[in-house]
Image (cartoon, grey):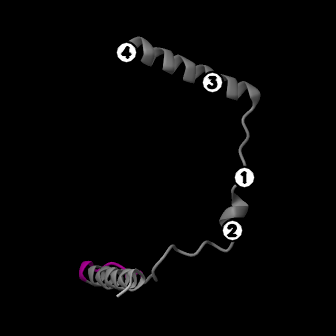
Amino acid sequence: MGLAEILVEIDNEIARLTEARGLLTGGTVVKRGPGRPKAATGVAKQAKKKRNLSPEGRKRIAEAVRRRWAAQKKAA
């Protein structure tokens, strides 16, 4: 029995247990195959926009980090 076969059996057992748990708790049963879930049809990617920091905002963040590092060094 190879590693791939063992993993498939484990995934099948997890699916069976998840379905049984859903039936016992009265929740909805979600049937999934092994592996990662499928990506959305591109809707989520279109909704996300890249957020850019202004130079002033970047400077404020850098200064805050330096203050935090200084406080940690002083405490140590």
Q: Which residue corresponds to the image point at 32% horizontal and 85% vertical from the top-left?
A: 16
In-front residue for pair 44/73: 73
Looking at the rendered image, the quarter that the C terminus falls into is top left
Is the C-beta separation of discs 4 and 3 under 8 Å?
no
Task: Please tell me which of labels 2 and 1 falls first in the chain.
Answer: 2
Is the C-beta separation of discs 2 and 1 under 8 Å?
no
- Residue type beneath disc 4: Ala
Residue, disc 4: 76
Residue, disc 3: 62
Tell me which secondary structure the magenta stretch mostly adopts: loop
Q: Is residue 68 above or below residue 50?
A: above
Which range of residues does the magenta coloring cover? 24-30
At mark 3, the secondary structure is helix
Is the C-beta separation of discs 2 and 3 under 8 Å?
no
Q: Which residue corresponds to the image point at 51% horizontal and 73% vertical from the top-left?
A: 36
- Return the mark for residue 49: 1
Task: Please tell me which of labels 2 and 4 falls first in the chain.
Answer: 2
Nearest-to-viewer mark from 4 and 3: 4
At mark 4, the secondary structure is loop
Magenta-span inclusion, residue 27: yes
Q: CA distance from mark 1 to mark 4?
A: 41 Å
Graded by Cα atoms within 10 Å as few (under 14), some (14 to 19) or many (20 or more), the crowding at tag 4 reads few
- Residue type beneath disc 3: Ala
